[in-house]
């Protein structure tokens, strides 16, 4: 029987002295367990010991302080992950998985998932449905979460030692993104809550993670799982819109959030799911005084509370079509998409667009700004200024929404009762910041013309040659 306590005690003693070599430490333990046993024990307890494993096989104390991000965007789903997933398909259906009956069934399941999604119907995830879902969504979910994590990473809000709780973890797309984003010398305890057959895909995809990234799958519902201890990051990846009581579920897990932790929620960009995310956000803030939106929908005015539709989403560069998606598309006997390798086809998904929410309990916000009521108009009072020119401060909360014609962007100061859009009718060097600024940026508009759009029941703030737009943050 392994003397686990002896191994851990020896490691705690030696960790401050020199790198820990399993070939050496076994001599300090009663019974002298095999070095391979010592190595495995150190790996299993790396988080509590604060140790990371080096390439030479020795263990050293993990680095302290926040991570130093190196993220530059996502171009593709990594080949190693793609091979790992295709191995699952081959194991289940054989090497000809995209062809014949198996390919037809997978394509049919993807079609059914899309129909159920747009009909707002619940889905039961058996093995085949879970594989179909992963086939279609793994790459874009993998990409999306990394862009959101980078907001926290660049602000110094992700520690090198991190406890993560992934509620409704699905097939593992967000988890793979977390694994990829965090540096190799970070220590991560990753608890994934997933009751469906998607948990099997998750375990297969996250099984061979690097040392120091320990995953545990809990096959329970979000409502039933009982978390232990505190987490630095609580993730809801494309799951809140599927829950009957999303607010209650998030509140349940707020009790497990560390004092400096973050709730990270993702949602598809479509109106139904994205606006549900905002509805959940607003109810949570109404019911929890200590909760703050870190990003992207920051309330700029102290007493502001938005009541508009809340349809806001971001769009990132497309990822390359994954090889397994391309093969499934190419073997379709019905509706073949010849351009699938260059973008979204019926069974391929390269677009990366999503809604997201970051919540904290320490009062921090991505943008700290106090508007001057003597100089800036408040969107809650826009009705007073129709046909007038005003100065405002607002967040840019969409990509260009106009398919053609004048560029159009959703903007918000967190106080508006109806939608506000900035529309560019006359480009100039003085207003180009509106189009060039990233999603979530804080902009100051000077001399912008306010009009009411009867068709859209929204305010249009016209950015023309007389308007100046500056990026503040």
Image (cartoon, rainbow, N blue to C red):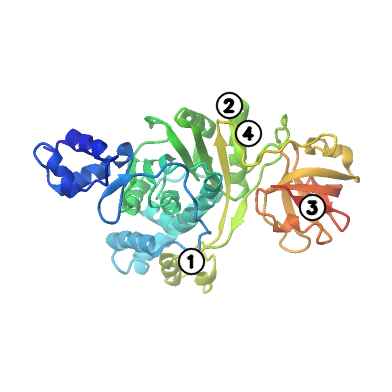
CA–CA distance between discs 2 and 1? 42 Å
Labels 4 and 2: the sequence-earlier one = 4
Labels 1 and 3: the sequence-earlier one = 1
Question: Residue 183: x percent and y percent?
Answer: 42, 52
Query: In the displayed structure, does residue 394 sit left or right of residue 152?
Result: right
Q: Where residue 290 is drawn, which disc sits there?
A: 2
CA–CA distance between discs 1 and 3? 37 Å
The extreme right residue here reads: 388
Question: Residue 123: x percent and y percent?
Answer: 45, 46
Q: Where residue 289 is drawn, which disc sits there?
A: none
Query: In the displayed structure, does residue 472 sit left or right of residue 425?
Result: left
Labels 4 and 2 touching (C-beta < 8 A): no
Labels 1 and 3 touching (C-beta < 8 A): no
The residue pinned by badge 3 equals 469
Secondary element type, mark 3: strand
316 versus 21 height, above or below: below
Q: Residue at x 31, y 36 (%)?
A: 48
Q: Tell me how many marks there are.
A: 4
Secondary element type, mark 2: loop
* Label 1 packing within 10 angstroms: few (<14), some (14-19), many (20+): many
């Amino acid at each position: 029987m392994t003397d686990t306590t002896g191994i851990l005690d020896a490691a705690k003693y030696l960790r401050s002295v020199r790198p820990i070599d399993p070939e050496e430490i076994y001599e300090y333990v009663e019974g002298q367990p095999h070095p391979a046993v010592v190595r495995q024990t150190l790996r299993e307890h790396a988080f509590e010991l604060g140790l990371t494993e080096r390439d030479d096989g020795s263990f050293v104390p993990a680095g302290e302080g926040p991570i130093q991000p190196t993220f530059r965007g996502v171009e593709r789903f990594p080949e190693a992950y793609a091979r790992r997933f295709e191995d699952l398909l081959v194991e289940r259906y054989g090497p000809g998985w995209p062809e014949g009956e198996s390919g037809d069934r997978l394509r049919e399941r993807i079609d059914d998932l899309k129909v159920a999604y747009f009909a707002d119907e619940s889905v039961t995830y058996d093995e085949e449905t879970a594989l179909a879902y992963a086939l279609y969504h793994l790459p874009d979910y993998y990409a999306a979460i990394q862009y959101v994590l980078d907001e926290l990473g660049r602000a110094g809000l992700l520690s090198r030692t991190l406890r993560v709780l992934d509620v409704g973890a699905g097939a593992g797309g967000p988890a793979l993104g977390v694994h990829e984003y965090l540096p190799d010398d970070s220590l991560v305890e990753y608890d994934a809550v997933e009751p469906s057959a998607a948990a099997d895909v998750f375990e297969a995809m996250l099984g061979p993670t690097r040392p120091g990234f320990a995953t545990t799958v809990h096959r329970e519902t979000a409502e039933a799982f009982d978390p232990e201890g505190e987490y630095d990051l609580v993730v809801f990846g494309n799951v809140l819109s599927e829950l009957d009581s999303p607010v209650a579920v998030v509140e349940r897990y707020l009790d497990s959030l560390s004092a400096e932790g973050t709730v990270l929620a993702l949602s598809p960009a479509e109106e139904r799911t994205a606006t549900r995310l905002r509805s959940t956000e607003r109810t949570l803030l109404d019911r929890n005084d200590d909760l703050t939106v870190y990003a992207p929908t920051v309330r700029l005015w102290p007493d502001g509370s938005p009541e508009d539709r809340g349809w806001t989403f971001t769009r990132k560069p497309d990822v390359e079509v994954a090889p397994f998606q391309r093969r499934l598309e190419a073997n379709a006997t019905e509706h073949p998409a010849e351009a699938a390798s260059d973008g979204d086809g019926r069974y391929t998904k390269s677009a990366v667009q999503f809604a997201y929410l970051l919540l904290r309990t320490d009062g921090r916000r991505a943008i700290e700004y106090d508007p001057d009521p003597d100089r800036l108009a408040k969107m809650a009072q826009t009705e007073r200024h129709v046909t007038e020119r005003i100065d405002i401060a607002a967040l840019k909360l969409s990509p260009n929404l106009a398919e053609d014609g004048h560029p159009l962007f959703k903007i918000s100061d967190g106080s508006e009762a109806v939608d506000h859009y900035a529309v560019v009718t006359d480009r100039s060097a003085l207003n180009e910041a509106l189009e060039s600024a990233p999603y979530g940026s804080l902009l100051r508009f000077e001399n912008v013309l306010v009009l009411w759009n009867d068709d859209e029941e929204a305010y249009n703030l016209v950015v023309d040659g007389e308007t100046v737009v500056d990026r503040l943050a």
